[in-house]
Image: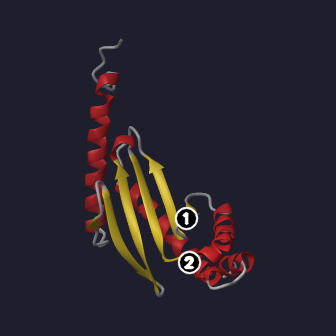
Amino acid sequence: MSSDPSREPPAQDAGGLRRLRGERALATLSRLLADDGWRPRPDGPGRFSMTYRSNGAVFEVRAEVVVPSEQLVVHAVAPLTAPPDRRAAAAEYVLRATWGLYVGSLDLDLDTGQVYARCGLDFEGEPLSPRMIRNALTIAVRIMETYLPGLTRVVNGAAPLEAIRAVETT
């Protein structure tokens, strides 16, 4: 075993170090959200909720630091849910939308009909930077901005393929 002080502490201290890094990440997230004008509201341990308005759409954005695993998860929550009789169509739409995404996803809870855009990152062993947070927020918000109009059309009876084509060709 090396006596080099720059190396990470032994395994028995890893949990404490993770917790410390996670708490620092949470402080960075909290500061960035306030400084960037998001007007965050605490929404549970390590989680904040914000209201986002853009191009006539209003939806909730949630950002959470999962302290024990050193992960950041951002959700942009659709302001509508897919009713039971439209969930299969909504599922097809969500799968078609997610297929072309390089980073992030559009997700559907088949039990509740809730749809959200998600972007997550693992910052294990690294400080969570403001740029990483902004990137994750931007990805989730842009996915929701892009695909919400088509989702609305599908929930209101449009065919999923038609709705995808409409949002991806504009």
2 and 164: which is toward the camera? 164
On the image, numbered disc 2 is attached to which residue? Answer: 148
> Tag count in the figure?
2
Give the percent coordinates (x, y) of residue 43.
30, 63
Q: Is residue 64 left or right of residue 157?
A: left
Element assignment for label 1: loop
On the image, numbered disc 1 is attached to which residue? Answer: 111
At a point 31% along the width and 49% down the height, the residue shown is 25
Front: mark 1 or 2: 1
User: Which of disc 2 and disc 1 is earlier in sequence?
Assistant: 1
At a point 40% along the width and 52% down the height, the residue shown is 72
What amino acid is labelled 1 in the image? Asp
Say which quarter of the image contains residue 108: bottom right
Q: Give me the C-alpha separation between circle 1 and circle 2.
A: 19 Å
Q: Is residue 125 left or right of residue 26?
A: right
Give the percent coordinates (x, y) of residue 162.
73, 80
Compared to residue 22, the image places residue 95 above or below, namely below
At a point 61% along the width and 80% down the height, the residue shown is 155
What amino acid is labelled 2 in the image? Leu
Is the N terminus in the top left, top right, bottom left or bottom right quadrant? top left
Give the percent coordinates (x, y) of residue 81.
52, 75
Give the percent coordinates (x, y) of residue 113.
55, 70
Tell me if label 1 and label 2 are in contact, CB under 8 Å.
no
